[in-house]
Image: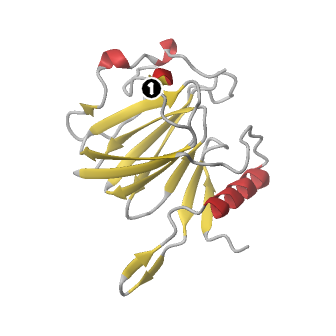
Amino acid sequence: MNIPLKVLSTPFPEVKLIEPTVFHDVRGFFFESFNEQVFNEALHLAYAQSGCATALKFPIRFVQDNQSRSQKNVVRGLHYQLQNPQGKLVRVLYGEIFDVIVDIRRSSPTFGHSWSVRLSAESHTQLWIPPGFAHGFLACSDRVDCAYKTTQYYAPEHARCIRWDDPDLAIDWPLQGVPIEGEPKEAARRFKEAEVFA
């Protein structure tokens, strides 16, 4: 099968950037933002080729779609769900974000490490984040519309948040002005105090 997307590696073997094939003509552009069969085949192949040992069960199924709108300098996260952990497929519909993930699997050799990437509506690149990572982003444009698919339903009783400005994580957010925080500080924990995965 001719798979019309690219799966690119990141510093975390389980986390992947997804680049769809975009068709341009005089009318504008067209691309498949998601195709379950193509996504699973491409991701499975990428894991196999990289020798990545993963506990993921294929096919990966998404059960919920979320969408948010943010103004410039809004910081969301760092979110995760401790039980019924969510895998996320993140993309930007309008504007640009500085997207950040943190490995919160205590048994992982990259536990406590973070990685960031800019995602934009113009590039159409998506970020696949499997369970085991905290996720957040900074809105870099005047307006950002962000959408993401999740592999588990939102469960507020299991939702957790780590401070985006945690000094131990020391994430270099490219802020241009005063940050607009999504959660009150008391709702987010320091990394060293947070509940994490085994």
Query: Would you say residue 84 is visible in this rendering?
Result: yes
Q: Quadrant of residue 99?
A: top left
Q: Which residue is more in the foreground, 39 or 6?
A: 39
State left or right for residue 186 relative to residue 32: left
Relative horizontal placement of residue 164, taking residue 157 as reference (left or right): left
At 56% from the left and 54% from the top, the residue drawn is: 17
Write the residue at 73% across / 43% down.
57
User: Where's the N terminus, which quadrant?
Assistant: bottom right
Tell me what residue is drawn at x 44 percent, y 23 percent: 162
Name the foreground residue: 182 vs 157.
Answer: 157
Res 141 seen here: no
Q: Is residue 145 above or below residue 162?
A: below
Q: Is residue 30 left or right of residue 36?
A: left
Q: Amino acid at mark 1?
A: Pro
Q: Position of residue 177 (x, y in %)?
A: 20, 38
Vertical relation: 38 (above or below) 163: below
Residue visible at 60% across and 35% down in the picture: 131
Percent of width and height locating residue 176: 24, 41
Q: Residues within 10 Å of mark 1 (few under 14, many from 20)?
A: few
Which SS class for mark 1?
A: helix
Snapshot colouring: secondary structure
Which residue in the protein does label 1 denote?
156
**Nearest to the observer: residue 22 or residue 67:** 67
Classify residue 25 as left or right of residue 139.
right
Residue 9 % position (x, y) = 63, 52
Above or below, 172 against 48 in this view is: above
Q: Quadrant of the C terminus?
A: top right
Residue 19: name its quadrant: bottom right
